[in-house]
Structures are given as C-alpha cells and as structure tokens.
Image (cartoon, rainbow, N blue to C red):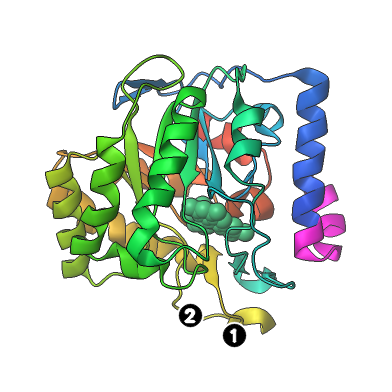
Amino acid sequence: MYQLIRPGLFALDPERAHDWTVGSMRRLGQMLGPRYPLPGRSVSLAGLQFDNPIGLAAGLDKNAEAVSGFSRLGFGHIEVGTVTPKPQPGNPKPRVFRLTDDWGLINRFGFNNDGLDALVRRLNNHPFAGVLGVNIGKNKDTPNASAANDYVSCLKAVSPVCDYVTVNVSSPNTPGLRDLADAKRIIEIVKPVLDARDLNRRRQRLPIFVKLAPDFADHDLEQVLEALLELSVDGVILTNTTVQRQGLQSHARHETGGLSGRPLTKQSEHCLRIADAHLSGRMPIISVGGIMTADDAQTRLALGASLVQIYTGLIYTGPGLVKQIVEKTR
Ligand SMILES: Cc1cc2nc3c(=O)[nH]c(=O)nc-3n(C[C@H](O)[C@H](O)[C@H](O)COP(=O)(O)O)c2cc1C
C-alpha cells in the first residue's frame, strides 16, 4: 500500500511531505484515538514496561501533535520533541533534503518547535498507553554557559505529562550544541537535570536518557559513556544524525545538516558495538540510526540494544516497518 503512496509523497517538497504526514497522523488520531502497542518482545527498562522494543525517534512529532495517530502504527514507545523552553522558528527553508538514491535524508531544521507550554498542553492527560518520552533541548539564543537552565526548565514542565525524558546534546543544527557533548561539559548539563528530577506521569521516578551523536572517536565515546555511568543516567540513546558524508550518490549530498537513514546504518552500529563492549550491561542502550528493515532492528538487538527507534526508515520503507519489526523480534 505504502509503495503506492510513496511516489506522491516524494513528488512533494520534503518539508511539505513531512507536514502532510504529521497532519494526516493528527487527523487519524483525532478520528480513531490511540492504539495499544502491538504485543511483541516486552522490555523492562529503567522501571518502565515496553510492550515491544520499537519506538518512534524524536523529531518526527516535534510538537506532540500526533501521538495518537503515530500510536496506530503499533509503537511500544513514542518520543516527541525536541522541545525548547521558548517557541522558535528554526533555520530558513529549505532545510530538509531527500537523498533518494541513498535512502537518506539531510536536515538542518534547527529545533523549530512550538515551545514548552504548547507541548505540555497537548500531552496533558494523554491517553497513549505505551511509553511516552519527551526529548528536550536548549533555545538557539541561550548561551552554552546557561544551557543547563533551559534543560532544567524543560524537565520540570514535562515530567508530569510523560514517562521519560531524553537530554539531547547531539543535534548538529543548533550552533555549539555538540560542544556540550564532551565528557566534562556533559556533566555540567546532565547533573542539574538529574538533580531536578521529579515523578513522571505514572508517579514513578522519572528516567532520564541522554542522546549522543555518532561522530565521536571511539575513545571519546567511551569517555562520555563513563561520565554518564558516573552520573547514573538511566540509558543512552545512540545515535543522532551524522555530519559525516561518505559514499553518497544523491545530488543533495553536499547540503549542510545531519544525515540519517541507510548511510548512517554502519556508523550507528559501530557506536552500538563500542558502547556495548564498554558498558557490559551497566547501562541500557537504545539504538537508532539507519534502521531501515526488520533485519536491521534484529541486528541491533543482537548487538546489545534493549530498544530501537526509527525515523527515516518510516519514510523509505513505510509505516508497515513497525509491525514487521515487532514480528521479527518477537
Ligand atoms: C528531519 C529530522 C528531524 C530530526 N529532529 C530531531 C530532533 O528534533 N531531536 C532529536 O533528538 N533527533 C532528531 N532527529 C534525529 C532522529 O531522531 C534520529 O536520531 C536520526 O534521524 C537517526 O535515525 P534514522 O536514521 O532512523 O532517521 C531528526 C531526524 C530527522 C531526519
């Protein structure tokens, strides 16, 4: 079915296709309400129960407009955001590009979002029965020296309306954000967030995950993981998009931004291998980046991931990918 719709969607400008998709999912959710996650291999992690190991990655439903609609696909968890304290428009358009021959995307959205108040309003008493995460970031005009305040404001506002929070220090599209991701700086951001931790929407201690870029040298990644272990973070999400460009065919390959999809598969897998070897089960890993098929997802779980997330795979393979992954990994 998706193979019939895809050419129409791909004929649209990528941001219009994105907006159309989110709008359609929002209307679907309004008509049918949320769906219970598809039953699959259940996962217990950081005190949360996941009915299956597949989640929606951050960035597709940035403003939490379409959680019910996306839940119809069967996800065990849905991560909305990145949200910043104040609304912001993001970078000038065009800011997302299809690399069709490579099954990839490049985006430089720059945390365009409606801001914290709008997101919290939409998630208040949300009926989604699966696990609901909120990915938090800082506003573009907040200097790195006071970035921790932005993260803490977001954490305090979203805790009562979600199940977990992801601290995003890995977007390549907010100037200087990745400077926050060396081991020392990461402690300065994450420690105040952990100290401000409250109860989640189920009145449990709120789990906090940290999402990292794939562009670390192996040793630097190990150092960051060590810092996260010392802080007793509840899990690490590996990976965000990459700034590297290798072996790409498509015209848009030179665009600035974060690259996702098939060209990221090997790099994300490599990060997972490094992290799994270093952590030896001391902290759960959520793997994301270039999971385009059910086999890709199965590989990640076999390599030590507890959960997986998808974004670009939904665009190229289609929404049926969620069910395929649930069935393959059961
Ligand atoms: C258009 C687009 C927007 C994204 N926005 C965000 C975001 O706001 N916050 C975030 O943590 N990750 C964001 N991501 C990264 C994804 O969550 C994911 O980590 C990355 O795309 C790799 O997964 P994939 O290859 O399955 O897409 C975005 C990705 C894309 C393609």
From the top left corner, tell me how far across and down residue 5 is, in percent. Answer: 84, 49
- 270 w.r.t. 150: above or below: below
Front position in the image: 303 or 30: 30
The reply to whether residue 120 is in sight is yes
Highlighted magenta segment, given as a residue range? 2-16
The residue sitting at 76% across, 63% down in the picture is 14
Residue occupied by mark 1 = 254
From the top left corner, tell me how far across and down residue 296 is, in percent. Answer: 45, 49
Q: Are marks 2 and 1 in contact (CB under 8 Å)?
A: yes
Q: Earlier in the sequence, mark 2 or mark 1?
A: 2
Is residue 254 rendered to the left or right of residue 19?
left
Is residue 305 rendered to the left or right of residue 244?
left
Is residue 231 rendered to the left or right of residue 172?
left
Residue occupied by mark 2 = 245
Disc 1 residue crowd, few under 14, some 14–19, many 20+, Cα 10 Å: few
Report how far apart the C-alphas of labels 2 and 1 lie in the structure.
8 Å
| The C terminus: image quadrant | top left
Residue 213 inside the magenta-drawn segment: no
Front position in the image: 306 or 317: 306
From the top left corner, tell me how far across and down residue 329 is, in percent. Answer: 43, 32
Kind of residue indicated by mark 2: Arg
Kind of residue indicated by mark 1: His
